[in-house]
């Protein structure tokens, strides 16, 4: 059984889908720890309700970024995490965690990377840019996390077709709908070594 650590900052719908899949045996792993850098994240309260270990660490709890990186790394090591899953985590991963867990950190991004990735492309900005460019499709990408934003090896993608009436908000919803299944499927394929990191 692999051990997952999920990093969150917000509402946590991807996190919930992954926890469900682990509990139902669709992912052969257990969620050992949910780490949030936002004390008020809905994801944090959902994880607590579901009796999963949680920890809140941020620049508020650790003013020194290096110290924050160390504590984050120690926490993930303490729980023997095999795979770190970013699910709406809004902070850059520190160098210590990156090197200790190299090739074992996943993220999901709501565009077809390399399009609409990198600094500034987050949240509704992405979908606004897609619509402004007149693209006919967008989607979600699962990739490995490296030092730069949205820049690691692409592991899986799924596209959605845009309609004339799509707004940034409706496109965001459309993509979120496919994210959950894509994340669950990809994590299981990694565990089964059908995707090699
Ligand atoms: C998703 O759109 C994901 O692609 C992006 O952040 C959002 C997280 O949503 N990285 P949720 O917290 O999983 O609901």
Image (cartoon, rainbow, N blue to C red):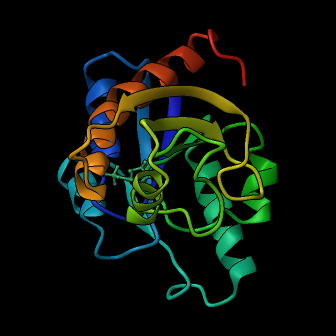
Outermost residue, left side: 49
From the top left corner, tell me how far across and down residue 3 is, in percent. 52, 33
* Residue at image point 28% right, 35% down: 17
From the top left corner, tell me how far across and down residue 88 is, in percent. 43, 56
* Residue at image point 75% right, 58% down: 148
Above or below residue 153? Residue 95 is below
Above or below residue 165? Residue 180 is above
From the top left corner, tell me how far across and down residue 27 is, in percent. 40, 20
| In the image: residue 175, left or right of residue 186 | left
* Residue at image point 71% right, 18% down: 196
Count the numbered circles shown.
Answer: 0
| In the image: residue 18, left or right of residue 150 | left
Q: Quadrant of the C terminus?
A: top right
| In the image: residue 174, left or right of residue 31 | left
Along the viewing direction, whichever of 65 and 129 lies nearer the viewer: 129
* Residue at image point 44% right, 65% down: 125
């Amino acid at each position: 059984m692999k051990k997952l650590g999920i990093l969150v900052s917000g509402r946590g719908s991807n996190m919930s889908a992954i926890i469900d899949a682990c509990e139902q045996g669709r992912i052969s792993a257990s969620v050992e720890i949910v780490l949030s850098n936002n004390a008020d994240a809905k994801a944090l309260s959902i994880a607590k309700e579901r009796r999963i270990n949680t920890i809140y660490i941020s620049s508020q709890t650790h003013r020194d970024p290096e110290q924050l990186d160390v504590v984050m790394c120690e926490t993930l090591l303490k729980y023997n995490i095999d795979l770190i899953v970013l699910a709406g985590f809004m902070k850059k991963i520190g160098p210590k965690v990156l090197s200790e867990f190299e090739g074992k950190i996943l993220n999901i991004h709501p565009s077809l990377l390399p399009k609409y990735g990198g600094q500034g492309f987050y949240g509704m900005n992405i979908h606004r840019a897609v619509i402004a460019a007149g693209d006919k499709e967008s989607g979600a990408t699962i990739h490995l996390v490296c030092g730069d934003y949205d820049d690691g090896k692409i592991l899986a993608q799924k596209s959605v077709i845009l309609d004339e009436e799509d707004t940034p908000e409706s496109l965001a919803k459309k993509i979120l709908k496919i994210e959950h299944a894509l994340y669950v499927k990809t994590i299981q394929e990694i565990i089964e070594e059908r995707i090699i990191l």
